[in-house]
Amino acid sequence: MVSMHFNYQIKNQGTLSHIFFIGSVDIHFLKNAKDIEKQLKPTCVFNLRGVNHINSMGIRSWWEMFFLLSQDKMRTFKFEEVSWAMVKANSWSPEIFSWGEVVSVMLSWSCESCGGEQEVLYPVDDLYDLIESDTSIPCKVCGGESYISEEFNVGSLAGPEEAAEQSKKAK
């Protein structure tokens, strides 16, 4: 809650911390690390739906924060509703989610007819089939066909086990 660019909310229940990140992950992001670390329980679920931007300094700050948070070896991390901004950042820095398991991601779809965009939530387990099928979805604005806005690194989102399994299927 230190930065004007970034905000967070933590909801603790028993041994679970549900952490909601909102705003821009940049150099200011790291200022929150110690405050967040003090509040976390052993099981941590990070909701990243509200992250609308991350830059190169944000990636570095992310790494530094999760290095600090991971010092408690009893802690586990999951990432849910990973925003499109974070999905794209994962393509630049594929180990960005190596601290834990990605459960679900928001994919950005663009309409070929009207240029409308929409984000849709998907479980990570469905990503390979979705990408391989060259799927389109109806545009919410005009009903035309929408396609995933950009290519992204599915393998590092799915985790090492899923990526290895998909690699075997491809051979």
Image: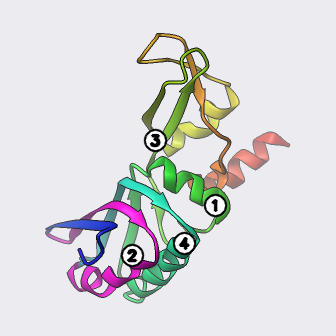
Q: Name the residue under label 3.
A: 123
Q: Residue at x 35, y 82 (%)?
A: 74
Residue type pointed to by label 4:
Ile
Q: In the rendered structure, does residue 1 fall within the stretch colored magenta?
A: no
Distance CA(mark 3)–CA(mark 1) = 16 Å
Q: Mark 1 points at which residue?
A: 160
Distance CA(mark 1)–CA(mark 4) = 20 Å
Q: Earlier in the sequence, mark 3 or mark 1?
A: 3
Residue 164: which quarter of the image? Answer: bottom right
How many numbered circles does the render carry?
4
Q: Name the spot of residue 48 as percent of width and height, x first.
A: 38, 56
**Residue span colored magenta:** 14-39
Q: How would you rate the neighbour count of disc 2 (Cα within 10 Å): few for under 14, some for 14-19, many for 20 or more?
A: many
Question: Is disc 2 placed on a helix, strand or loop?
Answer: helix
Q: Name the spot of residue 35 as percent of width and height, x first.
A: 25, 84
Q: Earlier in the sequence, mark 2 or mark 1?
A: 2
| Quadrant of image for the N terminus | bottom left
Relative depth, front residue between 87 and 24:
24
Residue type pointed to by label 2:
Phe
